[in-house]
Image (spheres, grey):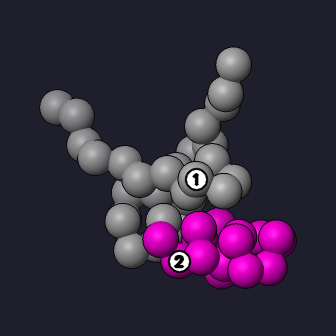
Amino acid sequence: MVKEAYICEECSLIYADKGVAEKCEAWCRKTKSCNIQIIKKAIGKLIKC
């Protein structure tokens, strides 16, 4: 069974919740930094080849 995952287009962190991924993306775009309260909810990181 495949579950949906959502990716922050700015930092490539993967989230199970779309809302959290959107918050991460907004934070990354605005501050160009990470927010520990958001990224601790990540389930992985997309590795780009």
Expressed as whole percent of the image width and height from the top left, the position of residue 21 reads 48, 65
The nearer-to-camera label among 2 and 1 is: 1
Q: Quadrant of residue 48?
A: top right
Q: Residues within 10 Å of mark 2 (few under 14, many from 20)?
A: some
Q: Which residue is mark 1?
A: 9
Whether pointer 2 and pointer 1 mark residues with C-beta atoms closer than 8 Å, the reply is no
> Is residue 9 shown left or right of residue 10?
left
Is residue 35 something one can see in this rendering?
no
**Residue most toward the top?**
49
Say above or below: 25 vs 27: above
- Residue at image position (66%, 56%) is 10
**Residue most toward the left?**
1
Q: Quadrant of residue 27?
A: bottom right
Q: Disc 2 versus disc 1: distance between alpha carbons?
A: 11 Å
The secondary structure type at the circle numbered 1 is loop
Of residues 13 and 36, the one drawn nearer to the viewer in this rendering: 13
Provide the major secondary structure of the magenta segment: helix
Q: Is residue 26 magenta?
A: yes
Expressed as whole percent of the image width and height from the top left, the position of residue 15 reads 46, 57
Looking at marks 2 and 1 on the same chain, the residue that comes earlier in the sequence is marked by: 1
Is residue 34 something one can see in this rendering?
yes
Q: Is residue 2 magenta?
A: no
Q: Which residue is mark 2?
A: 23
**Residue most toward the front?**
29
Say above or below: 45 vs 20: above
The secondary structure type at the circle numbered 2 is helix
Expressed as whole percent of the image width and height from the top left, the position of residue 14 reads 52, 50
- Residue at image position (66%, 30%) is 47
- Residue at image position (80%, 79%) is 31
Magenta range is 22-39
